[in-house]
Amino acid sequence: MAQTLYDKLWESHVVHREADGTALIYIDRHLVHEVTSPQAFEGLKLAGRKPWRPSSIVSTPDHNTPTDHWDEGIKDPVSRLQVETLDANVREVGALAYFPFKDPRMGILHVVGPENGATLPGMTVVCGDSHTSTHGAFACMAHGIGTSEVEHVMATQCLVQKKSKSMLVLVNGDLGPGVTGKDVALAVIGKIGTAGGTGYAIEFAGNAIRSLSMEGRMTLCNMAIEAGARMGFVAVDDKTIDYLRGRPFSPSGEAWDKAVAYWRTLHSDTAAEFDKVLTLNAADIRPQVTWGTSPEMVVAVDGRVPDPAQEADPVKREGMERALQYMGLQANTPITEISIDKVFIGSCTNSRIEDLREAAAVIKGKKVAANVKLALAVPGSGLVKRQAEEEGLDQVFLAAGFEWREPGCSMCLAMNADRLEPGERCASTSNRNFEGRQGPGGRTHLVSPAMAAAAAIAGHFADVRQRA
Amino acid sequence: MDKFERLDGLVAPLDRNNVDTDAIIPKQFLKSIKRSGFGPNAFDEWRYLDVGEPSQDCSQRPRNPDFVLNQARYSGAQVLLTRANFGCGSSREHAPWALLDYGFKVILAESYADIFFNNCFKNGILPIVLPAAEIEALFQQVLATPGYQLVVDLAAQTVTRPDGKILSFEVDAFRKECLLNGWDDIGLTLRHAEKIKAFEEKRRLEQPWLFAQ
Ligand code: SF4
């Protein structure tokens, strides 16, 4: 029978099946960071249980670590304790790889996994972090879990799961210049809403998706969770295989050939059926900017802030009014007239080398506008940082007036010192524009790296297509 | 985990769609390495007028009189009534920990975000899905009736309104059993340890690259 990619991934991981369809699913890769793991390690110890397969663990601190003054260590004592707790726990339990604070390979887990070849096609990848869906770009079944499940995976190497429904998001045609994986992600969320993917695993396909680099696909799968989906993934093709060749934990020699032969089977069969299909025309997707406090509150850069008065549903209308009030925006304002205070280029959505290249191409030889108080460029990992520096991108950012930081989550969630002050408005390449996400009272607009760069130069949102 | 069987509890209405986990428990409180003590910081940014910091005495902080949970009539609520896509955003289990520590044992909503929904069951909170029309009717009744209580019976899968109307709800059979018995699901999974080992060995032979050391 014709199978979807999801069917293949699911079936190859079922250890045990209950009569009601609940299954025990084997976990190949467990990514562990400092925020969601301490209670799990503690639980394991209290119950006197041994970790099942520590060599499935790849770990690094990322959420709490500072992005500057590394010589001074972690100043916040509460954050420091959390990072030290991770150090101690991983040292005790063991791992395939651990990149502690300041290690040259430290970084955001969802950047670190793929770039080290620790994320391989056909794997189940889990992490106590919702953006684990990122790894779906490699045809993995990858999703976030809570701390109880972190403990469950450590103790049993399995999770109790029910299969989701399948959705195919087909993006046909060619993406226009200046339109990126981020814009595709936001356009999909704008179309189906933040709950539109609830209960589904989404496969992204179509030639516009094929045309995306692995970085672009990671950005897209990263944001599948913002559409409410359990996970998002893309089938294996030559780009997947080329990306993985020669990475530290990728197989080599004979094992490589055997692996590649298997990976090539990781796509949906032609006749496979999905529970739901959504089709988008790539040519219709323009650079996107969010205007509200949920990723579904998004319009194209040449659009305007919507008017709640036009919304028929009273609960939605009230939500829009509340969002506009929080964001300090008037209905019908053209997006390009919204001026900004800060710019953040980083996060597991958009901090890979290609993202930095795209942003640098826009700002090269220009200066950050006078009204922009702070523009941050935060590479996703130590390896990305080094590569960018080898290409001279750091100099482009610095010459324009950006700050060039050490890797980490940074102002994506503002657990460290990088944050917005109340009322400040930010063009951000991260993934969430919730109230207070980048600091209490902060106002976040989600955009692609090129659009963030264009906004930094203009001092307000600007259509990157007109600046190229 | 505590058992959940039946509850007769006061209902508090949180009339919003898309309440995210950053709103339920803001990130600064995630620095804790403990599981408990998050209740005073549940909905911190909505509940208080100042900016909350970890390890602070919340009893002295200025409260936002406009936030619904600060109204005296909802004090001691154990059932949270809300709208669609509750618990969206991050995977933080600190969100159900905070709700539980605050006192909520049941949530009623049109829909939930996936990871949050899972996390509730792991902590003895029952998240119930009801159709939009029933949620709307409950909102009207709660707002009109001080001291509005609901009886939630997990075994029977029913919510009983004060006017006697019975609303039934669906719940996954396995999760229901776990909640009713307060089972530890790691223990349940480990009953299959031999099967897991056999699966792992086969996988190691077929795809040895997954087992790099
Ligand atoms: S970069 Fe942001 S979204 Fe990604 S893992 Fe870090 S905090 Fe989470």
Image (cartoon, coloured by chain):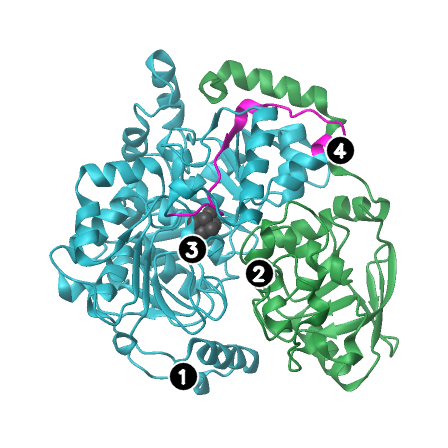
Chain colours: A cyan, B green
Taking the magenta stretch, the answer to whether it contains residue A253 is no
Q: Nearer the viewer, mark 1 or mark 4?
A: 4
Q: Main secondary structure of the magenta part?
A: loop
Give me the residue at 62% from left, 45% from top: A146
What residue did someone put label 4 on? A46
Disc 3 residue lies near ligand 1 with CB under 8 A: yes
What residue did someone put label 2 on? B26
The chain under label 4 reads A
Do the dots labelled 1 and 4 sit on one chain? yes
Asked if disc 1 and disc 4 are in contact, CB closer than 8 Å, the reply is no
The chain under label 1 reads A
- Secondary structure of the residue carrying tag 3 is helix
Q: Amino acid at mark 2?
A: Pro
- Secondary structure of the residue carrying tag 1 is loop
Quadrant of the snapshot with the C terminus of chain A: bottom left
- For the record, the magenta segment spans A44-67
> How far apart in space, not on screen, are marks 1 and 4 (Cα)?
54 Å
Q: Nearer the viewer, residue A213 or A273?
A: A213
Q: Earlier in the sequence, mark 1 or mark 4?
A: 4
What residue did someone put label 1 on? A307
Q: Amino acid at mark 3?
A: Cys
Q: Earlier in the sequence, mark 4 or mark 3?
A: 4
What residue did someone put label 3 on? A412
